[in-house]
Image (cartoon, helix red, strand yellow):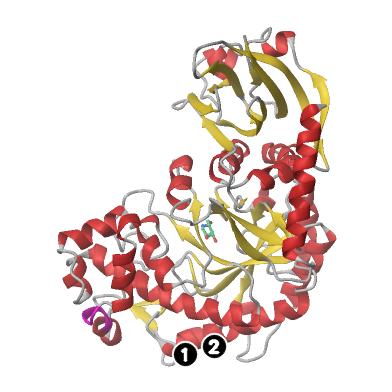
């Protein structure tokens, strides 16, 4: 078949180019820019993370790890995000214990999984609860953050050299260990540095050093960055700078105005500098990609009331400037507005990686949107081990489709050849234009063919992605959508040449069966009903 040949030739060329470029398999995992996309290269090949994150206390015993990992493989995960807890690695100062880390790596290898370790170091969700007891008990040497009213918080101060140095020391040791234990295999593909950093109660730390820094001049190099990137700055930052006359010299309040927003901006700068030092030290030992995750302010609260100054969307400029060793700033999505969060983080060269999302069945639809619309690098629901029936879980079905599409998707990433759609009760239709065609995607329930579509039930979230193979050939994969076609120039009508249900084996498209008659509404549409998952190929023509 023509399309089989086209895809096969394209894929062979693509992999040939890649292996020529990336050499052997002993390099570290690394990131490459491919036009608008960023790809994670593992063992010399682009890697899409079909992931899941373990609950916080699910990897603190080897028994748990050994019990959970086989279940993850059954779900079709290729990546698991695993806490690396400082308090367990360095129970006694200067004595390191990597038994759980190594056990997780061994178990991942047995179950065809890659690992991202989450460094629960100085901060885990704002707090310093993962610092070992010898740190917690010695707040004289390892000081706490203090509020405006002088109240100490269970948070290590970001202004303390000894805090920074101790985190840097153990993190570097950890990365050195990973290099020794795993560099050859590349089971560990990325590291998250700290977890959901963010100041609480106040928007910034107070105290002698914090106040001094706050009242001193904004670093000139940051102002230079703002000037150079003025056109692409986050709108809220630009507005604050503009409101103060685009000043280029002065304290934080003089340049950005007084108030909680400026307190937060300053604190973000300080956190970013701290994290930069930790990450840089780690990369000197083992240079693999690193990212940060973010607690989002989805309820519109004021700085201090939400974990403030982390890599929130409105602070991305500060983080990208002051923490250049961090490769990706990533959203943890626990609240509505999935598509909007994706857009905010797939921004200005920051690739979309979703390290955490609430464990919900709707993720089975969202994952298609993330990969199709935003060239996502990975997707990972939180507390993934809680899935009761891994084989029949909706996301398992989506991951199975994405596994098949993997070589085609990685080839197309960054080339503008894919889109994703996501529908629910409120958003039921979207039109996409490509070549001479208008693709009218709708929620399958808009057909009104299922009783559930009419009885007032909440429509489930459904989603799909479309891949352009040639101007008249497309792959559509997902769940719960219906798609019809029009021409853009209106000179002729768009017709469905034929539709095949397909599977993809080793990057080759293999037709499974022709879908016609009732399945295409006698040639009117392509359909994947609600509750079903499919990959279909459509050849269009004009009459
Ligand atoms: C976000 C954090 O990053 C996770 O570690 C976990 O605490 C979840 N929130 C929710 O429980």
Is residue 263 magenta-colored?
Answer: no
Q: Which residue is mark 2?
A: 134
Kindly report the secondary structure that dominates the magenta region of the rendered protein.
Answer: helix
> Residue at coordinates 74% horizontally, 12% vertically from top-left?
516
The C terminus lies in quadrant: top right
From which residue to which does the magenta span run? 213-217
Task: For mark 1, give the secondary structure.
Answer: loop
In this rendered view, identify the residue nearer to me: 444 or 126: 444
Q: Position of residue 378 (x, y in %)?
A: 62, 52
Look at the picture and state if 503 lies above or below 333: above
Q: Position of residue 233 (x, y in %)?
A: 33, 58
* Tag 1 and tag 2, C-beta contact below 8 Å: yes
Horizontal side of residue 484 vs 396, given as left or right:
left
Look at the picture and state if 109 lies above or below 362: below
Res 177 quadrant in image: bottom right
> Residue at coordinates 31% horizontally, 64% vertically from top-left?
304
Task: For mark 2, give the secondary structure.
Answer: helix
Ligand 1 near label 1 (Cβ, under 8 Å)?
A: no
Look at the picture and state if 66 lies above or below 1: below
Q: Which residue is mark 1?
A: 138
- Identify the mark at residue 339; answer none if there is no mark: none
Tell me the CA gap for discs 1 and 2: 6 Å
> Residue at coordinates 77% horizontally, 77% vertically from top-left?
181
> Residue at coordinates 76% horizontally, 63% vertically from top-left?
43
Q: Position of residue 96 (x, y in %)?
A: 68, 86
In this rendered view, identify the residue nearer to me: 39 or 394: 39
């Amino acid at each position: 078949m023509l399309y089989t040949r086209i895809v096969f030739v394209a894929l062979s060329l693509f992999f040939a180019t890649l292996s020529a470029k990336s050499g052997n398999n002993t390099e570290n995992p690394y990131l490459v820019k491919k036009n608008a996309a960023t790809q994670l290269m593992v063992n010399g090949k682009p890697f899409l993370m079909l992931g899941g994150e373990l609950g916080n206390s699910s990897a603190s015993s080897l028994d748990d790890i050994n019990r959970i990992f086989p279940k993850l493989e059954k779900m079709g995960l290729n990546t698991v995000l695993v806490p690396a807890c400082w308090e367990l690695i360095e129970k006694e100062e200067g004595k390191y214990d990597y038994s759980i880390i190594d056990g997780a790596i061994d178990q991942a290898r047995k179950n065809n999984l890659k690992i991202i370790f989450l460094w629960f170091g100085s901060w885990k969700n704002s707090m310093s609860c993962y610092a070992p007891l010898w740190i917690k008990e010695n707040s004289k040497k390892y000081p706490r953050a203090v509020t405006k009213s002088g109240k100490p918080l269970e948070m290590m101060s970001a202004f303390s050299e000894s805090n920074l140095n101790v985190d840097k020391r153990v993190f570097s040791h950890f990365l050195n260990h990973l290099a020794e234990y795993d560099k050859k295999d590349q089971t560990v593909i990325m590291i998250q540095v700290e977890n959901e950093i963010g100041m609480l109660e106040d928007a910034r730390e107070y105290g002698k050093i914090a106040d001094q820094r706050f009242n001193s001049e904004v670093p000139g190099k940051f102002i230079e960055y703002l000037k150079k990137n003025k056109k692409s700055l986050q709108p809220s930052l630009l507005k604050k700078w503009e409101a103060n006359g685009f000043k280029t010299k002065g304290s934080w309040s003089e340049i950005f105005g007084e108030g909680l927003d400026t307190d937060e901006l300053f604190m973000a700068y300080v956190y970013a500098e701290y994290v930069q030092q930790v990450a840089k030290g780690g990369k000197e030992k083992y240079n693999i990609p690193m990212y940060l995750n973010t607690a989002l302010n989805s309820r519109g609260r004021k700085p201090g009331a939400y974990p403030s100054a982390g890599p929130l969307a409105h602070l991305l400029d500060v983080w990208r400037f002051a923490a250049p060793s961090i490769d990706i700033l990533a959203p943890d999505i626990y609240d509505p507005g999935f598509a909007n969060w994706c857009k905010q983080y797939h921004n200005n060269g920051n690739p979309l990686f979703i390290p955490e999302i609430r464990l919900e069945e709707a993720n089975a639809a969202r994952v298609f949107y993330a990969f199709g619309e935003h060239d996502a690098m990975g997707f990972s629901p939180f507390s993934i081990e809680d899935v009761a029936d891994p084989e029949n879980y909706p996301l398992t079905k989506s991951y199975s489709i994405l596994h098949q599409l993997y070589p085609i998707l990685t080839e197309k990433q960054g080339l503008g050849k894919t889109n994703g759609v996501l529908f629910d009760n409120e958003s039921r239709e979207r039109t996409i234009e490509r070549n001479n065609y208008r693709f009218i995607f709708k929620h399958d329930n808009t057909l009104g063919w299922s009783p559930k579509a009419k009885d007032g039930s909440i429509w489930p979230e459904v989603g799909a992605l479309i891949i352009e193979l040639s101007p008249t050939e497309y792959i559509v994969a997902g769940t719960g959508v219906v798609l019809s076609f029009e021409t853009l120039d209106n000179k002729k009508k768009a017709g469905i040449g034929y539709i095949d249900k397909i599977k993809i084996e080793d990057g080759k498209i293999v037709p499974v069966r022709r879908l016609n008659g009732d399945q295409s509404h006698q040639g009117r549409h392509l359909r994947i009903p609600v509750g079903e998952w499919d990959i279909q190929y459509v050849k269009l023509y004009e009459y």
